[in-house]
C-alpha cells in the first residue's frame, strides 16, 4: 500500500484531507459559477429582453461559442504557465480573476440599459471562458502530484462527479434565480459574486505545490504553441490516442446536451421542466459512472473499463432511438404527466445508462493521461486535451446542425451518434490494443474467476522490473495483466501462440515467443534480444521460469532464462528488481491441464466464478537472484496462500 492508502477507505474520504478537499470544492465552485452565470444570461436574453441583433434562437449558440473560444486561443499558454509556476499560485490567481469578472457581470446584470447589459455580459462570458481555460490544466495536473497511483482513479472520479453535479446545480439555480420577479437579476448578480468569493476563500486552504518545470521559457504565440503542444502529446502515442478518446466523449456528450430542449419539446412533448429533468438524469448518470470507476477498478488505473463504457454508450444511445421512435403526438406536458407515461421511463433509463457508461469511459482515460504523461510536461498535455475537446465540441455542433438542416430528426441523430461511437471505439481499441487487452483481463478477473490480489503494491509503478510467476494455466498472463497498474510484456512458450483466440490475444499484447535453443536457435536468441529491449525501455517484463504449464499442479524447477535476462540487463547497466508472484487455486480450472486430460475440454468442471488468487512478494535485487532462490520465494508465496 502507498503512503496514503491507509488514510482513507474510499474516494469520499479524500474530501476530509487537505491535499484534496479544498481543491475539490474550489473546482466545484468554478463549474457551478460558470453554469449559473451562463444559463441565467441565456434565459434572460431568450425570455426577458428584446435584442434585435441577438435573436433568442441564436443566443445559446453565441454564448456557448464565446465561452469555448478562449479554450482554442489560450489553452497552450495556460498549459505552459501551469508547468512553470506553483499550481496553488495559479489557482488563487484564477479565483481572484473570477471575483473581478463576476463584479463586472453584477454591474451588467443590474444595469437598466439593454445596450450596456448584453455587450458587458457577452464580454464576461468570454472572460469566464478564459478563467476556465486557465484553470483547466491546473485541475488535472494537480491530482497526480498529490494523489498516489492507487488513488488517482478515485480522485478523478470525484472531480468528474463534482463537475457534473456543479453544472447541474448551476444550471438549475441560474434558471430559477433569473426568473424571480423584479429581483431576479440582482439575485443572480449577488449569487455569482458570492460564489466567486466563497471559491477564493476555499482555495486558500490548498497546499502549496512546487512547479514541475520552473525553467520553462514561455512561448506567448498561441498558434505555434498550440501546434507544439499537440506534437508534444503525439510523442506518447497511448496518451495522444487517449486524448482523442476523451475528445470523442465530449463530442458524444455535446450532441445529447445540445438537443435536450428540442428533444423535450418536439419529441417528448414536454415543457421546460421536462428539459431540466433530462439534464438531471444525464448528470446523475455521469456522476454515478464516475464514482463507480474506483469500485470496479480495485483502486488502480483500470483502462479495461473504457471498452465497457464505449459498449454501453452505443447500446443505450441506439436503444434511445427505438424508445423515442413510436411516441405519439400529445399536448405539451409538465413533469407529472410526463413521468406518468411508462414509455418515458424507458427514455430516462436509456439516458441514465448511456451517461453512466460515459462516466466509466472517461475517468480511466483521464487517469491514464495523468499517469503516463511526463510530469514536467503534464499541464501542457492537458492543455492539448482542452484544445482537442473544444475542436470536437465545435465539430459536434456543426455536424448536428448539418444533420438537422438535412431533415434528420433528433432520434435519428442519437442513432447516428450511437453507431458512430461504436465505429470510433473499435478504431481506437485496434490502434491501442492495451484498452482491449485490459478489458478482457478485467472481464476474466471479475466474471470468469473471483480474483483476489494480495501485495500488488510490490509491482513497481515506474522503471524496469522482471516479474516471475508459476505457470498453471493458459490464462496466467491475462490474470497478471489484470493485477498490474502498467502494461506487461510476456516471454511465452511459442506453442501457446497456436491456441485459437488466445494466440491472437497474446500476439496483440506483443508477447515474445520463445522456443528451446535446440529446437529453434534463432527464435531463442530473438526472444532474449526482445526481452532486453523491453527492460532498456523501462517497461515491465514477465517470464514463467518453469518453461511450460504444470501438468500435475505442483511447482516445477525454474530454468536459467531468468539469469540470462538479468545478465544482459547488467551489461546494459540496469539494476532490474525481480518481483516474485504466485498464482493459486487455478489448477483444475477450465484453462489449466488436469491429470486425466488436457485443458479447455470441460467448461464447468470447477463450477462458475471460482476463486483464484495472486500473491506478489517484495522485489529481490537482481544481483542477488538465483533460479533456486526465486523458486523458493514463489513456493513460500504459494504456501502462504494455501
Image: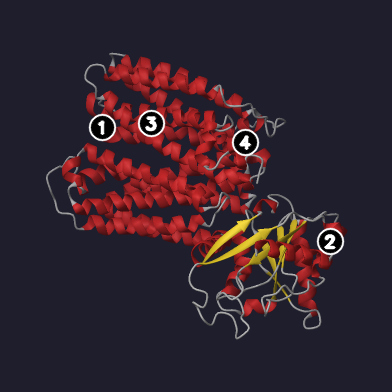
| Position of 223 relative to 91 (above/below) | below
- Residue 492 seen in the figure: yes
**Residue 121 spot, x, y in % from top left:** 37, 22
Q: Secondary structure at mark 4?
A: helix
Q: Does 141 sit left or right of 216 as displayed?
A: left
> Which tag, 4 or 1, sits closer to the chain's start?
1
Q: Calculate the distance from the C-alpha at mark 1 to the C-alpha at mark 2.
A: 74 Å
Choose between 340 and 61: the one closer to the eye: 340
Q: Calculate the distance from the C-alpha at mark 4 to the C-alpha at mark 1.
A: 45 Å
| Mark closer to the observer (4, 2) | 2
| Mark closer to the observer (1, 2) | 2
Q: Calculate the distance from the C-alpha at mark 1 to the C-alpha at mark 3.
A: 18 Å
| Mark closer to the observer (1, 3) | 3
> Which tag, 3 or 4, sits closer to the chain's start?
3
Looking at the rendered image, the quarter that the C terminus falls into is bottom right
Q: Are marks 1 and 2 in contact (CB under 8 Å)?
A: no
Q: Calculate the distance from the C-alpha at mark 4 to the C-alpha at mark 2.
A: 35 Å
* Color encoding of the figure: secondary structure
The quadrant where residue 343 appears: bottom left
The quadrant where residue 497 appears: bottom right
- Residue where numbered disc 4 is placed: 146
| Mark closer to the observer (4, 1) | 4
- Residue where numbered disc 2 is placed: 625
Q: Secondary structure at mark 2?
A: loop
Amino acid at each position: 500500500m502507498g503512503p496514503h492508502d491507509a488514510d482513507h477507505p474510499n474516494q469520499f474520504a479524500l474530501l476530509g484531507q487537505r491535499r484534496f478537499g479544498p481543491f475539490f470544492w474550489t473546482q466545484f465552485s468554478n463549474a457551478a459559477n460558470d453554469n449559473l452565470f451562463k444559463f441565467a444570461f441565456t434565459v434572460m436574453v431568450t425570455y426577458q429582453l428584446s435584442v434585435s441583433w441577438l435573436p433568442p434562437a441564436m443566443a445559446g449558440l453565441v454564448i456557448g461559442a464565446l465561452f469555448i473560444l478562449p479554450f482554442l486561443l489560450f489553452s497552450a499558454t495556460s498549459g505552459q504557465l501551469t508547468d512553470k509556476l506553483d499550481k496553488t499560485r495559479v489557482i488563487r490567481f484564477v479565483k481572484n480573476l473570477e471575483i473581478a469578472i463576476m463584479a463586472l457581470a453584477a454591474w451588467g446584470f443590474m444595469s437598466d440599459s439593454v445596450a450596456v447589459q448584453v455587450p458587458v455580459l457577452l464580454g464576461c462570458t468570454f472572460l469566464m471562458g478564459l478563467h476556465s481555460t486557465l484553470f483547466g490544466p491546473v485541475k488535472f495536473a494537480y491530482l497526480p502530484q498529490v494523489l498516489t497511483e492507487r488513488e488517482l482513479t478515485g480522485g478523478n472520479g470525484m472531480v468528474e462527479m463534482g463537475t457534473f453535479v456543479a453544472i447541474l446545480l448551476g444550471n438549475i439555480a441560474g434558471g430559477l434565480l433569473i426568473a424571480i420577479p423584479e429581483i431576479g437579476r440582482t439575485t443572480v448578480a449577488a449569487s455569482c459574486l458570492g460564489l466567486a468569493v466563497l471559491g477564493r476563500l476555499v482555495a486558500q486552504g490548498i497546499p502549496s505545490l512546487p512547479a514541475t518545470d520552473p525553467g520553462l521559457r514561455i512561448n506567448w504565440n498561441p498558434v505555434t504553441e498550440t501546434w507544439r503542444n499537440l506534437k508534444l502529446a503525439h510523442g506518447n502515442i497511448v496518451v495522444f490516442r487517449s486524448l482523442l478518446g476523451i475528445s470523442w466523449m465530449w463530442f458524444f456528450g455535446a450532441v445529447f446536451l445540445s438537443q435536450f430542449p428540442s428533444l423535450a419539446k418536439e419529441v417528448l412533448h414536454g415543457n421546460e421542466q421536462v428539459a431540466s429533468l433530462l439534464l438531471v438524469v444525464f448528470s446523475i448518470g455521469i456522476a454515478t459512472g464516475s464514482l463507480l470507476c474506483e469500485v470496479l477498478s480495485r483502486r488502480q488505473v483500470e483502462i479495461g473499463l473504457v471498452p465497457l463504457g464505449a459498449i454501453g454508450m452505443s447500446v443505450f444511445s441506439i436503444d434511445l432511438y427505438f424508445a423515442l421512435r413510436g411516441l405519439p403526438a400529445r399536448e405539451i406536458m409538465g413533469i407529472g404527466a410526463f413521468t406518468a407515461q411508462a414509455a418515458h421511463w424507458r427514455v430516462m433509463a436509456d439516458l441514465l445508462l448511456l451517461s453512466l457508461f460515459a462516466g466509466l469511459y472517461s475517468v480511466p482515460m483521464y487517469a491514464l493521461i495523468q499517469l503516463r504523461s511526463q510530469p514536467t510536461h503534464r499541464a501542457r498535455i492537458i492543455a492539448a486535451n482542452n484544445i482537442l475537446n473544444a475542436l470536437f465540441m465545435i465539430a459536434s455542433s456543426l455536424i448536428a446542425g448539418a444533420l438537422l438542416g438535412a431533415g434528420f430528426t433528433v432520434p435519428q441523430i442519437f442513432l447516428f451518434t450511437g453507431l458512430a461511437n461504436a465505429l470510433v471505439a473499435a478504431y481506437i481499441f485496434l490502434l491501442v490494443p492495451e484498452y482491449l487487452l485490459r478489458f478482457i483481463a478485467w472481464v476474466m478477473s471479475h466474471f470468469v474467476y473471483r480474483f483476489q490480489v494480495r501485495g500488488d503494491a510490490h509491482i513497481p509503478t515506474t522503471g524496469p522490473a522482471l516479474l516471475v510467476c508459476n505457470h498453471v494455466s493458459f490464462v496466467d498472463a491475462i490474470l497478471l495483466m489484470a493485477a498490474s497498474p502498467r502494461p506487461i510484456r510476456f516471454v511465452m512458450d511459442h506453442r501457446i501462440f497456436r491456441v485459437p483466440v488466445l494466440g491472437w490475444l497474446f500476439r496483440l499484447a506483443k508477447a515474445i515467443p520463445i522456443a528451446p535453443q535446440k529446437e529453434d536457435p534463432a527464435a531463442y536468441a530473438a526472444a532474449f534480444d526482445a526481452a532486453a529491449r523491453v527492460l532498456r525501455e523501462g517497461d515491465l517484463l514477465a517470464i514463467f521460469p518453469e518453461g511450460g504449464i504444470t501438468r500435475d499442479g505442483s511447482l516445477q524447477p525454474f530454468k536459467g532464462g531468468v539469469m540470462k535476462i538479468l545478465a544482459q540487463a547488467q551489461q546494459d547497466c540496469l539494476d532490474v528488481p525481480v518481483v516474485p508472484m504466485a498464482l493459486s487455486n487455478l489448477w483444475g480450472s477450465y484453462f489449466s491441464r488436469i491429470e486425466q486430460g488436457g485443458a479447455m475440454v470441460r467448461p464447468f468442471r470447477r463450477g462458475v466464478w471460482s476463486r483464484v488468487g495472486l500473491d506478489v512478494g517484495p522485489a529481490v535485487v537482481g544481483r542477488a537472484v538465483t533460479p533456486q532462490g526465486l523458486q523458493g520465494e514463489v513456493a513460500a508465496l504459494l504456501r502462504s496462500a494455501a
